[in-house]
Image: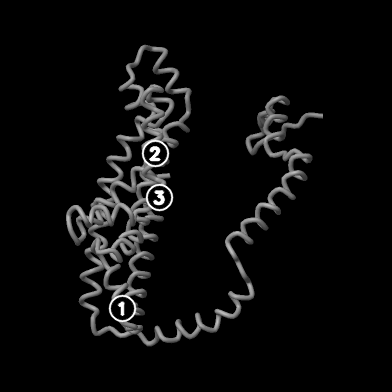
């Protein structure tokens, strides 16, 4: 019995394409979890979680007891006071400016470093030292860089920008490199087969494929830098963070609430704008 059916014009439609049995088996096997490994992994994961909970002194009872204090703290935040709204807006603009400059500088330097950290681009003598440098940078918190640059260039947003720029190399540089390593090797191999140079392979074979991911990760870096600039300000590296810390130390809960609300609005707007851009480029 034929599996084809006539279309509206009375012609027989072509049969649906058949998947090669070996390819079907490979695809189905990709979603199978080995039963023995899965059963062995359950107690290992359970022991790891128990060990972590005990070592970190996680206590549900203490959390329940502290819920009353948290509720009391949140109740003090209302109503917010807006008598210093002009100051909040000015500092939020400074925070946004820090994030923009830090993101641009960080993304450019991260892209340059990523060329040396991608195994399909860089030679081994460059690949491993670049990865080690990125690991060292990533292991240090941005606050450490902020304190270092505050002592070097003084208080203000310039120190925060430098801290965000250096911190970006360790985090987003690694992601950039992995995005370049994950490209389809077919076009790259074809270009190499016809004698393309290394620069041409990178320019026409790797970057066009990885560009959507690079832009998406850059937007993610920008969102993180906006939040990071808020934290860096607590150590005098500019932005709204210093004002936030001062309000907390002065127990000015109304002003603190206004600052938090404005930060939430700013981050939400940036997040929605970034989501729209990511949808259009992917």
Quarter-of-image position of residue 77: bottom left
State the residue position of label 1.
247
Under circle 2, the secondary element is helix
Q: In which quarter of the image is the C terminus?
A: top left
Q: Distance between the residues labelled 2 and 1?
A: 38 Å
State the residue position of label 3.
278
Q: Residue at x 72, y 40 (%)?
A: 33
Front-lying residue, 147 or 227: 147
Question: Percent from the top left, x then y, of residue 214?
Answer: 37, 41
Looking at the image, is 222 positioned above or below residue 281? below
Q: Residues within 10 Å of mark 2 (few under 14, many from 20)?
A: many
Of labels 2 and 1, the one closer to you: 1
Among numbered discs 2 and 1, the one appearing first in the sequence: 2
Q: Residues within 10 Å of mark 3 (few under 14, many from 20)?
A: some
Among numbered discs 1 and 3, the one appearing first in the sequence: 1
- Direction from residue 25 to residue 138 in the image, left or right: left
- Direction from residue 107 to residue 4 in the image, left or right: right
Looking at the image, is 64 positioned above or below residue 23? below
Q: Quadrant of the N terminus?
A: top right
Question: Percent from the top left, x then y, of residue 16?
Answer: 67, 31
State the residue position of label 2.
176
């Amino acid at each position: 019995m034929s599996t084809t059916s006539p279309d509206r014009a009375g012609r027989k439609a072509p049969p649906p394409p058949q998947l090669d049995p070996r390819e079907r088996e490979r695809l189905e096997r990709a979603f199978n979890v080995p039963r023995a490994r899965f059963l062995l992994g359950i107690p290992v994961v359970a022991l790891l979680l128990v060990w972590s909970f005990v070592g970190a002194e996680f206590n549900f009872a203490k959390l329940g007891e502290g819920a009353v204090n948290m509720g009391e703290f949140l109740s003090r935040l209302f109503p917010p006071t807006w008598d210093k709204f002009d100051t909040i807006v000015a500092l939020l603009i400074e925070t946004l400016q820090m994030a923009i400059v830090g993101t641009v500088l960080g993304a450019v330097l991260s892209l340059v470093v990523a060329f040396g950290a991608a195994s399909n681009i860089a030679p081994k003598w460059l690949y491993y030292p670049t990865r080690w440098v990125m690991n060292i940078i990533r292991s240090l918190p941005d606050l450490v860089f902020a304190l270092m640059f505050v002592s070097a260039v003084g208080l203000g947003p310039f120190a925060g920008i430098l801290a965000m720029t250096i911190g970006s190399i360790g985090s987003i540089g690694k992601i950039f490199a992995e995005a370049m390593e994950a490209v389809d090797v077919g076009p790259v191999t074809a270009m190499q087969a016809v004698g393309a140079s290394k620069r041409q392979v990178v320019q026409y074979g790797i970057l066009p494929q990885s560009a959507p991911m690079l832009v998406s990760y850059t937007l993610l870096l920008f969102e993180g830098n906006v939040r990071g600039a808020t934290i860096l300000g607590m150590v005098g590296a500019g932005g709204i963070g210093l004002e936030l810390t001062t309000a907390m130390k002065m127990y000015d809960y109304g002003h603190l609430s206004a600052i938090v609300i404005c930060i939430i609005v700013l981050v939400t707007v940036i997040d929605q704008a970034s989501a729209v851009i990511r949808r259009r480029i992917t």
